[in-house]
Image (spheres, grey):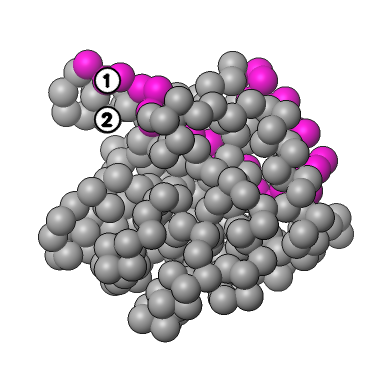
Amino acid sequence: MDSSMSRLSSLPIALQEALRQKRLLKVIAGLANFDGVAVGRIAAAAAAGGADLLDLACDADLVRQVAQDTPGLHLCVSAVDPALFPAAVAAGAAMVEIGNFDSFYAQGRVFGAEEVLEITRATRALLPEIVLSVTVPHGLALDQQAQLAVDLAAAGADLIQTEGGTSAHPVAPGVLGLIEKAAPTLAAAHAISRAVDLPVLCASGLSEVTIPMALAAGASGVGVGSAVNRLQDDLAMVAAVRGLRQAMPLARGLAKSSLH
């Protein structure tokens, strides 16, 4: 068993099973969202709607609050500074993630392949046993994204996450617009899942329409943020998460039928 498989086997059984069945649903509260009330509402909706994982900002107090208020919901913390991770892990995070980088692009902050690799190596040195997910920046060409994924696997990443919603500029309304919005991250999931043996999480710009496409492209799970966290009504957030969850069994059925 290689070290990545060994670390993945340390995840809670429910997360291991969700990855194995290619149906992991992660709700993203936001790397820069430190509002405890807002994150608490998103966490409650994620739990009620059937999500497997909540991705939240890397803050130990926030992790403790969510873990106390939403027991049973597994937590992943996101940051780009490795030094922030150990305290959040000690507070109860099941895994850590570098990225995604969407919140930085509006500030003109761009992450290159070498910087992401450096952050990955530093994180792995700090936390040799914790499960580590790393986002591949969507600004790289697809072949460069695939190569970076290979390099990240060698540097100790256990999962690879894609992104791309911020680079998509859909022009069509309705379903076609949703597909245009997801196209960059879907393309990345297809390329990266064929370049590495690690599980791939497809994130950024996804919806109920495009989740089945992400899984068919090779992803083991999906991460969805704005489709849930931009909503102001608690019931609407729960309904959104349930809709995302319900989109996943259909995708598994399609994938299975395509093998015959």
**12 sits left or right of 227 in the view:** right
Q: Is residue 92 above or below residue 223?
A: below
Q: Mark 1 points at which residue?
A: 170
Residue placed most toward the observer, 176 or 96: 96
SS state under label 2: helix
Residue 14: give its label. Answer: none
Q: Which amino acid does label 1 sit on?
A: Pro
Answer few, some or many: residues within 10 Å of disc 2's Cα (few below 14, many 20 plus, some between 14 and 19): some
Percent position of residue 17, x then y? 57, 65
> Which residues are the magenta region?
142-171
Q: Earlier in the sequence, mark 1 or mark 2?
A: 1
Q: Which residue is drawn at 44% across and 70% down?
A: 62
- Determine the image quadrant of residue 107: top left
Q: Quadrant of the N terminus?
A: bottom right
Q: Can residue 190 be seen from the camera position used here?
A: no
SS state under label 1: loop
Q: Which amino acid does label 2 sit on?
A: Leu
Percent position of residue 70, x then y? 38, 78
Answer few, some or many: residues within 10 Å of disc 1's Cα (few below 14, many 20 plus, some between 14 and 19): some
Residue 157 on the magenta span: yes
Q: Mark 2 points at which residue?
A: 178
Q: Distance between the residues labelled 1 and 2?
A: 7 Å
Residue 229 on the magenta span: no
**Tag 1–tag 2 contact (CB < 8 Å):** yes
**218 sits left or right of 171 in the view:** right
